[in-house]
Image (cartoon, rainbow, N blue to C red):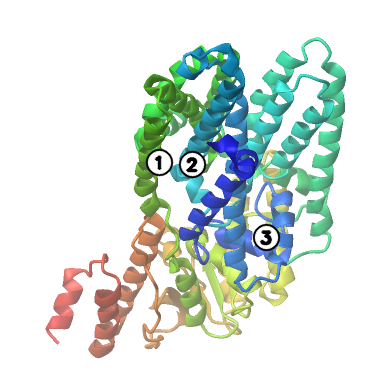
Amino acid sequence: MLAKSKIIGKYYAELAGLVVFLFYLLTLAPSVIQIDSGELAAVQATLGIAHPTGYPIFTILGYMFLKIPLPFTKIYLANLFASIWCAAGIIFFIKSIKLILSNSNFNRLEVLKRKKKKENKNDKNINNIVIIISLISGLFLAFSKTYWFQSTSVEVYSLQIFLFNLIIYLTLKSFYKSENNLYGWIGAGIAIAFGFANHMTTLLVLPFPGILFLIKEKNNGLKKFGVTLIISVVILSLLYLYLPVRASNNPELNWGNPINFENFWRHFTGKQYQVWLFSSFDSAKKQLSYYIQNLPDEFAYVGLVLIFLGLYEFFLSNKKLFYVYLITFLFALLYTINYDIVDIDSYFLLTYIILISIAAYGIKFIFEKLNNINYSIVISVVFIIILFVKNYSKVNQSDVYTFEDYTRSILNSVGKNSIILTYQWDYFVSPSYYFQYVENERKDVVVIDKELLRRSWYYNQIERNNPDVLKNLKSDINNFLLALKPFERSESYDSQLLEKYYQRILTGLISQNIDRRDFYIGLELIQNEMQRGEFKLPDGYQVIPHLFLFKVVKGNEYVPAPLPEFKIRFPENRNKYINFIENIVGTMLTLRAMYEIQYGKYELAKIYLSKIRNELKNFEIPSNILKLIENK
């Protein structure tokens, strides 16, 4: 039994965390992946400022970790750090389950019905069972889909779920401590401060320490609360000072430029994202429906069985704590479903942690009903294997090089000192931050996010990194920023005036740079803004397909493009982001083939179409294009 081994008995949670970490290495992404991965890795590596709310502790800790002289790329180290946080979170989750089970009713276990002279042995048996159940619960959380996925690449949520688990553990430890526990509550308060210094979803966990503090300290808690609050606020304030201090040094990546209080407050509160919060009842209904439908997939169905059993067992064994967990769950769920974003899964992580805490009591129920430790362990292990196997292919990022290949291929397809105007943030712009500012690849190429041009701070970042790009647009930019100021302050503003100057800047970027730099535009602008008349080229210019992008050219003469000699690796585990890249590459190659046909260059057209056939297996070439080629 576990009690016979002092090392295992004492460090069972840490050993489990190590095992989980080793499994996480199997699914770790070797490079950048979708959405914010590239930006966040670049911010950590360069000590920059990330998108709101800035994530100072995430940035600082990541910067220090990336300074460790290990023989890996910076992006791999950043991804590795995420897996460490997730595994460490499992350690504190296991410790939390051990605490609540140790303070729960185990009367139905047959082992307690033995004679009093064996009480010490009974205590050891109960302790061993509690440890086993805690370990099983930890593995269930570790290999649940969304939690596991956070371990595969750099993201703020990996640190956040560690902090969620740390806050819950320190709160429980303080709650169950019999003697004066001021320092325990201070520790929990500091963990909460760290949480808010990482991500504002820390708000979701506040009912848990709040209610347990009131229950425990109902008679003499005012002083403890005051001391804890003051220390926590001071620490939180010091951590967020990173933003204005670092902004004053004007780093390469300086989202929000929080150099003054107005910019800082806008960045700290995530003002630009607040429009998606509590937007409508229909939005909340949609997110709730998604949450419910996703639950079976999250826990491979077997987890739901344990959760349902756990609800019954938790209520019977520990009513007071059951209600605390339930209230925290409902608060977190109801708040999160009112956030109208597409990639909502990460915001549900706290609810998943709570559900697996409830599932721990489902495992307890099985142990008590079977009254046989070996059979109970076998059943639990089978459940974990089912969960692991079902979720492995869904979270595995170990062969994902698609975003790296796509980004490098685009950067290498354009001429020296070119400008690229796009808003493919999730696929190209964010990864380009990493390769340009960390790996120093093609820093001569200016990548401009068309949507970020709507934000005042972005002009400062462009000016800092590529000052000559904007030098002939000062008048329009100043007029735009003046019209933008009341919008960013939530005051009355002139939308038509704002759009007028915005459009002039877009067009001016081309007209004022085209003589000195090649200019390229993303397919999405052509299909959307240009078709709707929201974006116009300077007079006398047109766009032609140029491998991955459209090149802005003057006149109607034939313009050559690079041959499709690039290599983009597509993984077996597909998602909508991978599919988007395949579709956009296939579309651009098809358009280039059509361009070649237009000028009678059928052999070149065949080369582009052959690339699609050989490497873009899921992209279907239009039949009319194939017929034109077949006839030649």
Q: Nearer the viewer, mark 3 or mark 2?
A: 2
Residue 518: percent from left, percent from top:
54, 81
Say which quadrant the C terminus sits in.
Answer: bottom left
Image position of 139 with respect to 259: above or below: above
Residue that badge 3 annotates? 458
- Judge from the rendering whether residue 244 lies leftward or rightward of residue 119; answer left or right: right
Q: Which residue is mark 2?
A: 139
Q: Report which quarter residue 171 is drawn in.
A: top right
Callouts 2 and 1 close, C-beta under 8 Å: yes
Disc 1 secondary structure class: helix
Q: Which of the two labelled residues, at mark 2 and mark 1, occupies the earlier sequence position?
A: 2
> The disc labelled 3 sits on which kind of residue?
Tyr
- Closer to the camera in the image, 289 or 180: 180
Tell me if residue 154 can be seen.
yes
Label whose residue precedes the other's in the sequence (3 or 1):
1
For badge 2, the amino acid type reads Leu
- Work out which residue is located at the far left of the displayed protein and give it: 631
Nearest the viewer among 616 and 117 is: 117
Marks 3 and 2, how far apart in space?
Answer: 43 Å
Q: Residue at 57% across / 30% down in the picture?
A: 97
N-terminal label among 3 and 2: 2
Residue under circle 1?
384
Look at the picture and state if 287 lies above or below 366.
below
172 horizontally vs 379: left or right: right
Distance of mark 2 from mark 1, alpha carbons? 7 Å
Residue plotted at (55% across, 31% down): 128
Q: Which mark is residue 500?
A: none
